[in-house]
Image: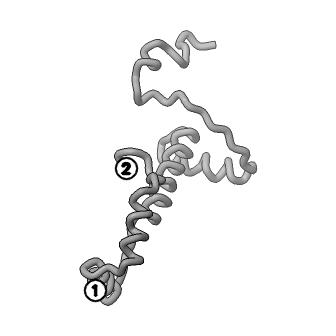
């Protein structure tokens, strides 16, 4: 055991301290690949996996909140916004009333 305790009072009072834990099962090949990538980046395996998971989570949520369309589709969309149908207005009201899947402030 080292002379430094992994969880101290200082860490508990720091809101950016990582205190939550997840566990996953991976193959030896996956671990070797991820460990090699972490080493190349100068990171621990834990840091590499945490960063990669965070990046993928942001990308996944962004796919569901941002849309890229061509000029023609954009013009149709803008025209629909200018003159929405009754059904569209009802659907938008329902959508606005639903809670967001994104965390607050995202």
Expressed as whole percent of the image width and height from the top left, the position of residue 82 reads 24, 80
Q: In the orientation shown, which residue stands out farthest toward the top?
A: 3
The disc, 1 or 2, on the residue closer to the chain's N-terminal end is: 1
Expressed as whole percent of the image width and height from the top left, the position of residue 99 reads 45, 52
Residue at horizontal 49 percent and vertical 46 percent from the top: 51
Q: Give neighbour class at mark 2: few <14, some 14-19, many 20+ (Cα, 10 Å).
A: few
Distance from disc 1 to disc 2, alpha carbons, whole Å, reads 28 Å
Left or right of residue 77: residue 58: right
Residue at horizontal 35 percent and vertical 86 percent from the top: 73
Between residues 65 and 90, which one lies in front from this camera angle?
90
Total numbered labels placed on residues in the image: 2
Locate residue 96: give its quadrant. Answer: bottom left
Marks 1 and 2 in Cβ contact (< 8 Å): no
Q: Give neighbour class at mark 1: few <14, some 14-19, many 20+ (Cα, 10 Å).
A: few
Between residues 95 and 48, which one lies in front from this camera angle?
95
Which one is closest to the eye, mark 1 or mark 2? 1
Left or right of residue 36: residue 24: right
Expressed as whole percent of the image width and height from the top left, the position of residue 41 reads 48, 47
Residue at horizontal 48 percent and vertical 53 percent from the top: 101
Between residues 29 and 22, which one lies in front from this camera angle?
22
* Quadrant location of the N terminus in the rendered image: top right
State the SS at label 1: helix
Does 99 appear above or below 74? above
Locate residue 2: give its quadrant. Answer: top right
Residue at horizontal 43 percent and vertical 61 percent from the top: 62
Left or right of residue 32: residue 98: left
State the SS at label 2: loop
Q: In the orientation shown, which residue stands out farthest toward the bottom?
A: 72
**Where does label 2 land, which residue?**
106
Does 76 appear above or below 12? below
**Where does label 1 land, which residue?**
75
């Amino acid at each position: 055991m080292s002379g430094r305790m992994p969880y101290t009072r200082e860490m508990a009072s720091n809101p950016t301290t990582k205190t939550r834990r997840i566990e996953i099962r991976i193959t030896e090949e996956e671990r070797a690949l991820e460990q090699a990538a972490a080493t190349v980046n100068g990171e621990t395996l834990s840091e590499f996996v945490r960063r990669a998971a965070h990046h993928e989570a942001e990308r996944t949520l962004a796919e569901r909140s941002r849309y890229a369309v061509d000029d023609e589709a954009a013009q149709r969309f803008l025209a629909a916004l200018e003159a929405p149908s009754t059904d569209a207005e009802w659907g938008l009201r329902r959508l606005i009333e639903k809670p967001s899947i994104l965390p607050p402030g995202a």
